């Protein structure tokens, strides 16, 4: 079915309209990893058992698993901008609870509140990126992913610095200020995109949309990449520690991975928009790079091998992620971009949880090399789900690049 563009005529989109969206992506990644790293480092001092630490680490992701599709659908109904602003303000409010983080109950409330808030502004931000991207979905999702990767990279480092200087109170105060500052930028810089008319869908329609390859394929790619990231963040530092690296050296492995991913994403998105890198080929290359990097980490000992594996895994994530998101944006009518992005990010969260569980479960039975091998096999198998390319710009853009330019969309009814 052909979808027709609905947009306010005469409005020109500038890069300044998109930067607050990148900042929102940075905020959710920075908040998640800064607090998680701090919890791991300070768990003994605040009286947390290993079980309590695990629960607190999981609260953020559990909230996102259940709520991202809900808030994504809400952004389709009321428009994404109010959901982004509300989510960021809620993130700031939840972070203020963390000023009393020495009490485990208050820390749990802050962590859960942050996860719930991120569930709102994260899918709404990505759907807004899609609607403002025009025909350059790869380019702008590359930038968006790059800023999220930067949050993953420097979150643990800045989080540790904040805790050293002022404890959890300073870390959560910083996060509260960050959320508020980004919300203010969104209010003034991001154009309001009105909700678009949506057809009624039956349960059968939704089932078909959610199992269509143009949705399910890139979602599985995202889940595989995020699963590898989640496992690498935990197990690569452990491997580095076995090689005699200190704490700083072990943590730097994750930083190398995240920086490699951040640097490559904008370039990959640009190649995609130029028609140089087809979606399917790029996603397959990215996932195979992740699989090879994971095998190197599991099978070859030595510091050089570990850092090489980190570069390969980071580059693979940086290749596959913007292509998968851009494919989803191009294959989805604009009136349900929020629901699509929320559902796709649900897949990412499940992958984030499943990757470390797969490696850990197999490692307990057969050793860490076998666990990493199992992850490499799963990531490689996900490459079979990569969908063929769609025409860039096929999704219903909310606003044209040039004043008065209307776009006719060729997106099919994918979720």
Image: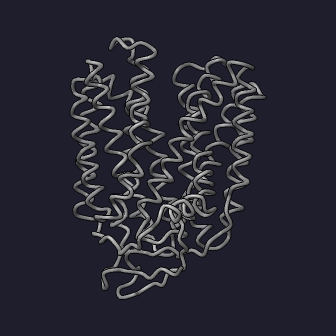
Would you place residue 72 above or below residue 119 in this image?
Answer: below
Point out the image quarter for the N terminus.
bottom right
Q: What residue do we see at 25% from left, 55% from top?
A: 85
Question: Can you tell which quarter of the image residue 312 is in?
Answer: top right
Q: Taking 91 as reference, is 406 left or right?
A: right
Q: What residue do we see at 56% from left, 19% from top?
A: 246
Question: Can you tell which quarter of the image residue 124 is in?
Answer: bottom left
Would you place residue 371 above or below residue 2 in this image?
Answer: above
Q: What residue do we see at 43% from left, 28% from top?
A: 57
Front-most of 377 and 232? 377
Front-most of 404 and 220? 220
Measuring from the top left, give residue 280's x and y in whole percent: 69, 62
Q: What residue do we see at 61% from left, 35% from top?
A: 355
Q: Taking 135 as reference, is 277 left or right?
A: right
Q: What colour scheme does the image use?
A: one colour
Q: Taking 279 as reference, is 71 left or right?
A: left
């Amino acid at each position: 079915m052909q979808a027709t563009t609905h947009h306010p005529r005469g409005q020109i989109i500038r890069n300044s309209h998109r930067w607050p969206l990148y900042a929102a992506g940075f905020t959710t990644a920075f908040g998640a990893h800064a607090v998680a790293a701090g919890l791991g480092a300070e768990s003994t001092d605040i009286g947390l058992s290993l079980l309590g630490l695990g629960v607190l680490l999981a609260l953020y992701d559990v909230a996102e698993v259940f709520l991202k599709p809900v808030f994504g659908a809400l952004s389709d109904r009321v428009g994404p901008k109010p959901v982004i602003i509300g989510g960021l303000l809620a993130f700031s409010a939840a972070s203020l609870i963390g000023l009393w983080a020495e009490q485990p109950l208050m820390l749990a409330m802050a962590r859960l509140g942050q996860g719930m808030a991120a569930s709102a502004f994260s899918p709404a931000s990505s759907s807004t990126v899609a609607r403002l991207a025009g025909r350059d979905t790869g380019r702008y999702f590359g930038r968006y992913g790059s800023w999220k990767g930067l949050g993953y990279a420097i979150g643990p480092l800045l989080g540790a610095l904040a805790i050293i200087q002022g404890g959890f109170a300073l870390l959560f105060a910083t996060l509260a200020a960050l959320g508020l500052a980004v919300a203010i930028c969104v209010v003034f810089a991001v154009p309001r995109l009105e909700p678009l008319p949506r057809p009624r869908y039956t349960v059968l329609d939704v089932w078909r949309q959610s199992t269509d390859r143009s949705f399910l394929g890139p979602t599985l790619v995202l889940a595989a990449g995020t699963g590898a990231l989640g496992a690498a963040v935990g197990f690569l530092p452990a491997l580095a520690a076995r090689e005699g690296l200190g704490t700083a050296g072990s943590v730097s492995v994750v930083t190398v991975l995240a920086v490699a991913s951040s640097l490559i994403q904008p370039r990959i998105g640009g190649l995609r928009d130029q028609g140089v890198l087809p979606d399917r080929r790029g996603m397959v290359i990215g996932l195979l790079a992740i699989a090879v990097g994971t095998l190197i980490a599991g099978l070859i000992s030595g510091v050089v091998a570990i850092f090489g594996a980190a570069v390969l895994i980071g580059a693979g994530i940086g290749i596959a992620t913007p292509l998968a998101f851009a494919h989803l944006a191009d294959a989805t009518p604009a009136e349900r971009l929020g629901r699509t992005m929320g559902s796709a990010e649900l897949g990412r969260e499940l992958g984030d949880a499943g990757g470390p569980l797969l490696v850990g479960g197999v490692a307990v039975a057969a050793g860490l090399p076998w666990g990493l091998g199992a992850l490499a096999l799963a990531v490689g198998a996900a490459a079979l789900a990569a969908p063929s390319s769609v025409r860039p710009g096929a999704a219903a853009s909310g606003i044209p690049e040039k004043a008065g330019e209307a776009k006719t969309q060729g997106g099919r009814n994918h979720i």
